Amino acid sequence: MLENKENIKKDKIEDDSIDPSLSADNSAVSSEESVSQSNDVSESMNESSSLDANLDNTDDSKSQSANDENSNSISLPFIIGKKIGMSRLFMDNGTAVPVTLIEAGPCYVSQLKTNSNDGYDSVQLAYGNRKLKNLNNPIKGHLSKAGLESKSHLKEFLYNDIESIKLGTEVNLSQYDIGDSVNVTGFSKGKGFAGHMKRHNFSGGRASHGKNSVMRKAGSVGAGTDPGKVWKGTRMAGRMGNDRVTVKNLQIVKLDESKNIIFLKGAIPGSNNKIVYLNKNN
């Protein structure tokens, strides 16, 4: 028993002699590890803060650029576009809607006319691109007044409130919303020279009781001794199509502002890649 107690005391003494150095080393290591960990944490926090600052700066720059773009654009009830083609969209309730795709804008204000100078108030918009070498000097000078280089189409719209409009201002799809109705004006497809039956839906002559070669004739045009002439405007054979046509109250189904495409419910006049004019209904 005495020997065991002495051995236990020796072990305790040896442990006390060894433990302080080990504890000192462990404390030093732990302190170094804690310092390195704190440095890593601070570095990561600095990196995250710098990333957050960069993200904030990019967001601020994006918002500022968006504000600059919005400040350089104006909302007008009319715009110039180009017919792309027809398609269909499936609505949420499963119904299929026939739509016409129009690439509308961006347009730019190229001229302002006032009642005092020109006798009426209007806004002229410029749309499309064209090679500069294909423009004559008067058009170049006209566009240069608005800060524009080359545009292919110019169109004038009557508009009274022109005090706040500046030359060179952009007009885009930001003025339209889904559900708005617009009037679309364009030129119908040209079909060349056509007879009176195809052009005006006449029935032609009778094909029985001894009639000969009168089935597709125009018949009498009303000219006799009195008045002795054909009245102006009489429906006869002639050029068919290529007429100015306006389709009213077409509903906007979808908008793609990134590609400047507007989806209208229904059909509009003209063939693909033809210029059309959109006017918003009040």
Image (spheres, helix red, strand yellow):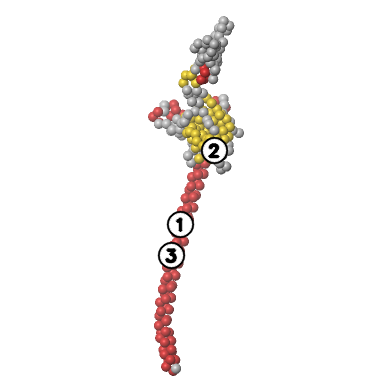
What's the residue type where badge 1 is placed?
Ser
Q: Residues within 10 Å of mark 2 (few under 14, many from 20)?
A: few
Name the quarter where the C terminus is drawn. Answer: top right
Left or right: 133 as drawn, with respect to 91: left
Looking at this rendering, what residue extends furthest in the right direction? 282
Q: Residue at x 56, y 7 (%)?
A: 224
One can see residue 135 in this view: yes
From the image, tell me which residue sits under label 2: 96
Examine the rendered structure and indicate whether residue 78 appears above or below residue 193: below
Q: Position of residue 251 (x, y in %)?
A: 57, 35
Q: Secondary structure at mark 3?
A: helix
Q: Position of residue 23 (x, y in %)?
A: 43, 78
Q: Position of residue 201 (x, y in %)?
A: 54, 20
From the image, tell me which residue sits under label 3: 40
Q: Position of residue 11 (x, y in %)?
A: 42, 87
Q: Residue at x 57, y 5 (%)?
A: 225
Q: Secondary structure at mark 1?
A: helix
Does label 2 or label 1 sit earlier along the sequence?
1
Examine the rendered structure and indicate whether residue 58 appears above or below residue 191: below
From the image, tell me which residue sits under label 1: 50
